[in-house]
Image (spheres, grey):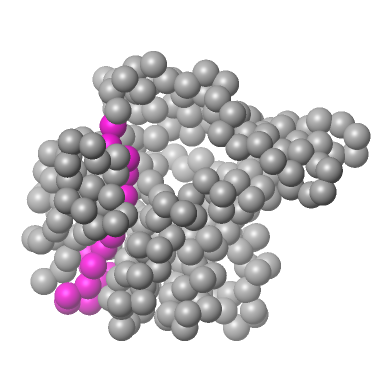
Amino acid sequence: MRYSEYPENFARFYDLIYHELRDGIDNEFFLDEIKKTGGSVLEVGVGTGRLFLKALKLGADIYGIDVSKSMIRILSGKLREKDRARISIQNLIDFNFNFPFSLVLAPFRVIMHLTDKSDQLVALNNVYNHLKPGGKFIFDTFVPDLNYLIKGLEHHVDFEGEYEKGKKLKRIVSTRPDLINQLIHVHFRLEWEEKNNVRSEEWDLPLRFFFRYELEHLIERSYFEKYQILGDFEGNRLAQKSKEFIVICRKE
């Protein structure tokens, strides 16, 4: 399994970009799940703390892991010293804690970074082994839009704003589909103004997309015996117009 380390400037601007692009979509759903949980919580793909910091302020007994050193470094700088032990550089496949969790979350497409099916199964079972009886594992992926997958994106600007007063930031995204291997090859380009120059940084990322019955077969091969798949972050059932797979696995 090869992990894609976030470049320094992608981590640097992550909060600005994703607080705008993502907060209104999934924050309330995941924070509600955390509030309902009585025990310890683990957030996989904690990043720079978009959900983690809010949960910590709510008094949650939450821990976070991420494969990216640059993201963890930024998050660590936001935490009080006593809370820094709550975060660590680990991955979904073989993370290890010596205590169980009541809830494990892998928000914002984390599982799509696992491009190999054997890694996906190992990851599910690793989560299962870290859950208390009655605990839940929740992750999300998008419902594939075949027209979008085949057509892809070409130099699409998905964020444009200021990161400091008078200093502009732009992110440009291109995608290339690999239908045989069910991959989307994503190319990111950041452009920002600094010291009277325009600087840039680029990053390539493969993402594995899933179909409904493939997800069901994957979960049914794992240790999990009960699960449901919702169609959005409002808790609605899957329907023709659903754009999200919200997967909730339960440990008996």
Q: Indicate the position of residue 153 as horizontal and vertical percent values.
A: 47, 21
In the image, 131 versus 152, the foreground residue is: 152
In-image side of 24 versus 228 (left or right): right
Q: Indicate the position of residue 85 as horizontal and vertical percent values.
A: 54, 76
Q: Is residue 142 magenta?
A: yes
Stretch in magenta? 128-144
Q: Is residue 129 magenta?
A: yes
Residue under the image location 48 percent in, 60 percent down: 46
In the displayed structure, 132 sits above or below 2; it is below
Q: Indicate the position of residue 72 as horizontal and vertical percent values.
A: 58, 60
Residue under the image location 36 percent in, 57 percent down: 106
Using the rendered view, name the quadrant where residue 243 is placed.
top left
Q: Indicate the position of residue 80 as horizontal and vertical percent values.
A: 64, 79
In the displayed structure, 214 sits above or below 224; it is above
SS assignment for the magenta stretch, majority: strand
The reply to whether residue 234 is in sight is yes
In-image side of 36 versus 22 (left or right): left
